[in-house]
Amino acid sequence: MADGIRIDKWLWAVRLFKTRSDAAEACKSNRVLVNGTTVKPSREVRTGEVVSVRRMPVVYSFRILEPVANRQPAKNVPRYIEDVTPQEELLKLEMARAGAFAVRDRGMGRPTKKERRDIEELLAEFGELPDMETDE
């Protein structure tokens, strides 16, 4: 076992990302924090540090139990990480899943431009969609 391991490699090894390049891109996009600080993909992590991964609408938090460099089978992952995600964050996920399917009466057809804007405004309030309008 190494004393420290690159964050992108560790995120991939414990199956938080499907590929190492996805993990590196998340680090570059400031979606990965270690102990509350944004990191570059080359940052080394050690035992006991808390890694937060932002996946809208939830920020997942994990404590490193043991740094590992090789990709692990899914059943072995709990040996290397502890999920410390607050319950409030998990509730955000449940709320997003519950409201994921908008109900539209049969025969109503496509939403009008006004209805679409109202829907986008409502979803933007919940942080599910980025603001669609740009001021250029």
Image (tube, rainbow, N blue to C red):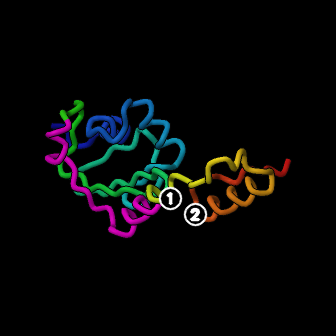
Is 70 part of what is drawn in magenta?
A: no
Q: Per the image, is 81 magenta?
A: yes
Q: Which quadrant holds residue 42?
A: top left
Circle 2 sits in a helix, a strand or a loop, which is it? Answer: loop
Q: Quadrant of the N terminus?
A: top left
| Residue at point 78%, 51% (across, down) | 112
Question: Gap in Å between the C-alphas at discs 2 and 1?
Answer: 10 Å
Residue situated in front as seen by the camera: 34 or 128: 128
Q: Is residue 81 left or right of residue 28?
A: left
> Residue 49: x percent and y percent?
28, 56
> Residue shown at 32%/35% (left/top)?
12
Task: In this rendered view, identify the residue nearer to me: 43 or 24.
Answer: 24
Estimate the x, y position of residue 61 in percent, counting from the top left.
Answer: 34, 57
| Amino acid type, mark 1 | Gly
In the image, residue 12 above or below residue 78: above
Residue highlighted by disc 2? 126
At horizontal 24% and vertical 31% (from top left) the residue drawn is 71
Residue 43 lies in quadrant: top left
Counting from the top left corner in percent of width and height, residue 48 is at 23, 57
Q: Are marks 2 and 1 in contact (CB under 8 Å)?
A: yes
Residue indicated by mark 1 = 99
The percent coordinates of residue 76 (x first, y second) are 14, 40
What range is drawn magenta here? 74-95
